[in-house]
Image (cartoon, rainbow, N blue to C red):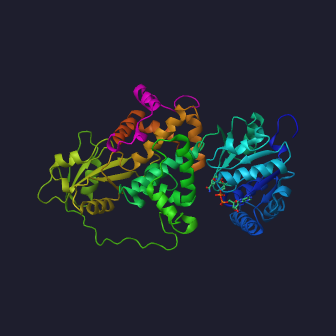
Amino acid sequence: MTSGVTQPTDIREVAVIGLGLMGSGIAELVARSGRRVSAIEVDRSFLDQGMARLHASLDRAVSRGKLTDTARDEVLARIRPTDNVAAGVGGADLVIEAIPERMELKRALFARLDEACRADAILATNTSSLSITEIAGGTRYPARVAGLHFFNPAPVMKLVEVISTVLTAPETAGTLTRLSADLGKTPVAVTDRAGFIVNALLLPYLNHAIHLLETAQATREDIDKAATVGLGLPMGPLTLLDLIGLDTCLAVLETLQDEFGGTRYVHAPLLRKLCDARLFGRKSGRGFYDYRRQSPAADHGPSPVPGEVALIRERNGRLDELAGQIAAVGISVVPQPSGQTGLVIVAADPRHRVLDAALAAGHPADVVGVHFVEVGDGKPGLAELVLPDVTAAGTAAKAAALAARIGLNAVISRDRPGFLLEALAYAQFNDAVRMFQDGYASPADIDTAMMLGCGYPRGPFQMLDEAGAANVVSVLDAMHAATGDPAFTPVPLLAEYATAGSRFRAGTGG
Ligand code: NAD
């Protein structure tokens, strides 16, 4: 490794430091590729815990038929556990650091690595958001320091962000990129900026979901359902926050806030309160959800399905199908409210308040707005049931009961522009365009990163193109006007694409 271009095959011995959630997965992945691994922890007890996690993961792979008994034993034979950093890293071609997300710990460790590693060893950090430039700054050979950001669980998730600082040698980044591909991953190369691609887009979206919850826009279940049913994401934002760990999410938001400022990364007060209460999510047993006991299903008694529904149809036929579905279950549908009407349905548009249509219909206390979100792939869509604050106390229950009777996949939202799904998704699209506008990453790379790092079925730019830039801009404008929050102002490049009617992923390579 002293001269020329380092090939993945030249990286034969890898030291992984920190065998927690991430490090144990990274050690497994590297050992499964045939390389020798030094697995390093602070002391014997953490080492035993980390190795137990690694054993359990390999055992699962065997029981699922993905690995033979013999192959598992060979993988384990390639891993050398130790609590002696200097001994563990001495012969390493590559060191991957995966200790907790705290700058002082990482800088202290890298100072030790500087002494203990070979001068030509590559030093990589798995940090989620900290400045790699600052970590590298404390070493003698910053040209060989870079970020190698895996996703949880490391053996499974396909994305690796390869991060270069201004001091990283191109050969270092090149070697890590080729190595990632050799490990079966899809590398995306980026420069050192807080949160890189994925966390810079994911964390403000998660934070926004907490804002929606704490301002009573919807229940936690409905916020999560809007994301899974409406966007096709593998889990809702509040469930994902609990999985990542609320303390980690708070730390990443603070780093993003320090770097970018503005209002988008200011953590929701509820996030801090849950952290103060040490409710960190799944790992501590409780966060937004309680994992220690099964919460009993809420029992609201028999559903008060109304006998007559007034449905104010639109000229464009948007609610015609709904009228047919309601009539098909024996509920009478009338075009205007009468004395018998239990519920008044109007079409809801995320750019406008439902309140105005409710007042025009003459029965504001009984009005629910319905907005259908189309999801691709022939999957049933999401119905957002939107309730102005002036509706009567029982209207939400009636609307939910009607939705259940006719088999709609529905969520209930307060009457604020963007409702649930558009509020969450379009604000993230705006962040993604800002990232592209800043020259940080291309739409194609951003889409790849979000699909392979977070399990998105389609990337944010693909979804944005489907929704239409002009439509996204008008919803964001309405959100901005309603909240006064400058974070929702459409970024100039998005406004330009909207004016030109252009797509972000049009043409070859997007
Ligand atoms: P973790 O707390 O599960 O594991 C960290 C481990 O490092 C612990 O086992 C701890 O004993 C050990 N450790 C601490 N100081 C050490 C030292 N000086 N030498 C050796 N071992 C030491 O944390 P994690 O979730 O695995 O995160 C590790 C890093 O990976 C962080 O930088 C984090 O931001 C990043 N990361 C986390 C995730 C995630 O989803 N949790 C995803 C990608 C990246």
Q: Is residue 74 above or below residue 141?
A: below
- Whether residue 243 is visible here, answered yes or no, is yes
Q: Is residue 246 left or right of residue 387?
A: right
Q: Which of 103 and 218 is in front in this view?
A: 103
Which residue sits at x=74%, y=58%?
28
- Point out residue 140 in the picture as x, y percentages from the top left corner: 79, 41
- Point out residue 400 in the picture as x, y percentages from the top left corner: 31, 61
Q: In this view, does 433 lie to the left or right of 94?
A: left
Q: State which quarter of the image contains the N terminus.
A: top right
The residue stretch that appears in magenta: 481-510
- Point out residue 293 in the picture as x, y percentages from the top left corner: 50, 74
> Can you tell which quarter of the image residue 499 is in?
top left
- Point out residue 122 in the picture as x, y percentages from the top left corner: 79, 44
Q: In this view, does 398 lie above or below 107?
A: below
Report ligand 1 position as a quadrant.
bottom right
Q: In this view, does 206 lie to the left or right of 192?
A: left
- The residue furthest left is 339
Q: Nearer the viewer, residue 76 or 254?
A: 254
- Whether residue 457 is visible here, answered yes or no, is no
Which residue sits at x=54%, y=32%?
438
Is residue 382 inside the magenta stretch?
Answer: no
- The residue furthest top is 500
Q: State which quarter of the image contains the C terminus.
A: top right
Is residue 483 inside the magenta stretch?
Answer: yes
Q: Which of 166 and 427 is in front in this view?
A: 166
Q: How many marks?
A: 0
